[in-house]
Image (spheres, grey):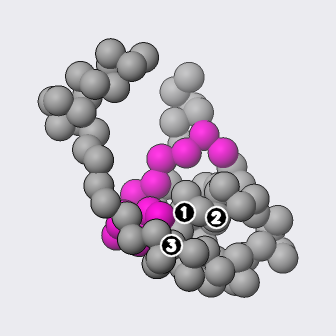
Amino acid sequence: MLRDLQSDLREGVLRVVAVDWADVPQISEGLSARHTEEHGHRLADILQVATAIHQGAQEFLTFDGNQARLAQAEVMRVRWEIDQI
């Protein structure tokens, strides 16, 4: 797995990007305020979606239905890779 990760990084399939960790908690608070009471989103899901928003992502890949609903609620296109397993 590590060898595959290193290969993907080398070939540009994946890339490491900087995140402004001061910004992500603010985005997370907004997500939580808008969606958690009604849908019960977990902290990890909120942080992952907030980080994607911070990075300007338009598409979100997930294996988790609750996380997918949160990303969709924030107008991201969601890819459900679980169907391909």
The location of residue 57, given as percent across then percent down, is: 37, 63
Q: Element at badge 2?
A: helix
Q: Amino acid at mark 1?
A: Val
Residue, disc 1: 49
Instruction: Using the image, determine if residue 73 lies above or below residue 29.
Output: above
Residue, disc 3: 24
Q: Element at badge 3?
A: helix
Q: Is residue 69 something that shows in the picture?
A: no
**Foreground: 69 or 50?**
50
Horizontally, residue 25 falls left or right of residue 40, namely: left
Instruction: Using the image, determine if residue 70 lies above or below residue 34.
Output: above
**In this rendering, the label closer to the viewer, 2 or 3:** 3
Q: Residues within 10 Å of mark 1 (few under 14, many from 20)?
A: many
Q: Which disc, if any, is residue 46?
A: 2
Instruction: Using the image, determine if residue 6 lies above or below residue 25.
Output: above
Contact (CB < 8 A) between labels 1 and 2? Answer: yes
Q: Which residues are magenta?
A: 51-64
Q: Earlier in the sequence, mark 2 or mark 3?
A: 3
Whether 19 is among the magenta residues is: no
